[in-house]
Amino acid sequence: MSAATAEMAEVERLTRRGLRLAQITVAYNVVEGIVAIGAGLAAGLVSVIGFGIDSGIESIAGVLVALRLSARLRHGQADEAKERLVLRAVAVTLFVLAAYVTVEGIRALVSEETPDASPLALVLLAASIVVMPVLAAAKRRVGLALRDNLILADAAETRICVLLSISTLAGVGLFQLTGAAWLDPVAGFVIAAFAIHEGKEAWEGELVDDDDDGDRRDDIDEDDARTATTGER
């Protein structure tokens, strides 16, 4: 097998992995969104309802990414014009998410709303804190290996889901301990700033930076070292 053929096979393998990760994320987010909105409505938890809406936004972004990766596999190459549009669509979802979190945070502070507890919501949020970091890290590795802004944008959106899970869980949990109802909206403002930053980079196609190049080279060096060690054995 020539070097070019081997490289093409590796690109296809990584692209298929990125597609599977996007599909898994969409499936999880659909279930997560339905459960979160149901639990939020039952307990009167606006933050949990918002978390469910965020899951819907992420599902839309994940479907867009999966469709483009599927098309790339069918045609054997990327359609850069269409993928740039999808990347900007993902950026828009990040901006929408930032706007929603900001508006809800301001409204919660002004109205001095008091969060309620919901065992189902707490279990769901805890599960997301476990599942989503694994998916985000896997997507980031694939995105860096391919230098693919589309997959990296999807990974960024998944990381925001992790932050939202932590924020919502902390807001409800810490209020039960301290009575400080302002913790949830304030944490939401931090998440909104992160979403705007990631959305701007996704819009401009600048999700691969110098630090990422270093991470990618480190990963390649580690793989080479393992290969050399295996060969010596």
Image: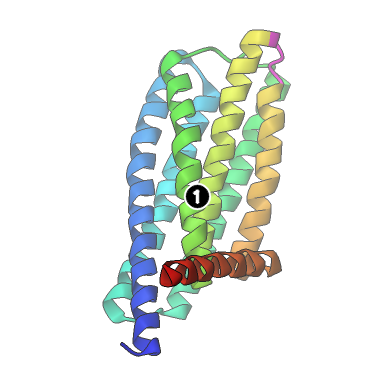
Determine the residue positioned at 66% across, 52% down: 196
Residue 46 located within the stretch drawn in magenta: no
Q: Name the residue under label 1.
A: 136
Determine the residue positioned at 65% across, 36% down: 103
Q: Is residue 208 visible?
A: no
Render colour scheme:
rainbow
Q: What stretch is highlighted in magenta?
A: 178-182
The three-letter amino acid code for the residue at tag 1 is Ala
Label 1 Cα neighbours within 10 Å, binned few <14 / some 14-19 / many ≥20? many
Determine the residue positioned at 59% across, 63% down: 202
Does dot 1 land on a helix, a strand or a loop? Answer: helix
Q: Count all numbered tags in the image, as a single digit.
A: 1
Q: In x, y percent, where is residue 91?
A: 56, 59
Depth order, front residue of 114/216: 216
Q: Is residue 26 visible?
A: yes
Determine the residue positioned at 62% across, 63% down: 215
